[in-house]
Image (spheres, rainbow, N blue to C red):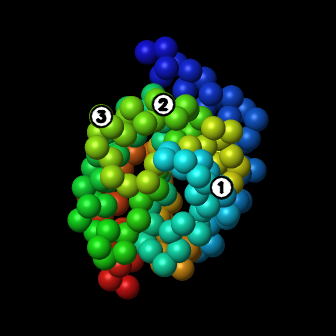
Amino acid sequence: MKQAFLVTLLLLLTLLFFPAGRAEAVVKIGMNLPAGQFQGLKGGSVRLPDAVRGKVAVIHFWALGCSSCREEMPAMDSIYRKLRARGVEIVAVNMGQGRSEVEKFARETGISYSLVLDPERQSVQLYDVAGIPRTIILDRNGTIRFKIIGSTPAELIRKYVTSLLDS
């Protein structure tokens, strides 16, 4: 409960300091994903969109206190396991939480796709992540094809991803 309150407070402060109107112009459907660098959960750094170039990619922004995020992530893992051989990559960007907490979550849920850390919450400005969950789906060229604000059924994500695989 305390963690959920802190996440909510952090999101409200983010909205106060980075109004949606200003950030909205940053990331639009049809443009290439701006470059960002994140901490890999297993060490090193992960650069987006470089890390997913040539693949249909789902970039999911989340936090541990977000209940819908925690529900969506195992469902996305099912999509990843079924479609990764066809060139699908999923990267879940944790917003502002510690490595040990995220590692524990990954162990408990058995998530097999990439989890990265955004401790300074640079995603707020880079990718218009004013609230979570937020999902961006890229085609193989790194072009943003879908932006999902809020939670969404796994079947819809699968539909979007397969439409890009088949095109």
Q: Closer to the observer: label 1 or label 2?
A: 2
User: In x, y percent, where is residue 34?
Assistant: 67, 64
Tell me which corner region of the image, top left, top right, bottom left or bottom right, holds residue 36.
bottom right
Tell me which corner region of the image, top left, top right, bottom left or bottom right, holds residue 163.
bottom left
Q: Secondary structure at mark 1?
A: strand
Name the residue: 56% across, 39% down.
95
Q: Which label's residue is closer to the chain start, 3 or 1? A: 1
Q: Which mark is residue 108?
A: 3
Asked whether, in this view, residue 76 is left or right of residue 34, the answer is left
Name the residue: 52% across, 42% down.
94
Asked whether, in this view, residue 23 is left or right of residue 143, the answer is right
Q: Is the residue marked by circle 2 packed among few (<14), some (14-19), or many (20+) residues within 10 Å?
A: few
User: In x, y percent, where is residue 89?
Assistant: 41, 65
Q: Which mark is residue 37?
A: 1
Q: Which residue is mark 2?
A: 100
User: In x, y percent, where is residue 7?
Assistant: 54, 26
Per the model, the C-alpha gap separating discs 2 and 3 is 12 Å
Q: Which label's residue is closer to the chain start, 2 or 3? A: 2
Q: Amino acid at mark 3?
A: Glu
Q: Amino acid at mark 1?
A: Gln
Asked whether, in this view, residue 130 is left or right of residue 87, the answer is right
Nearer-the-camera pick, 22 or 163: 163
Q: Which mark is residue 85?
A: none
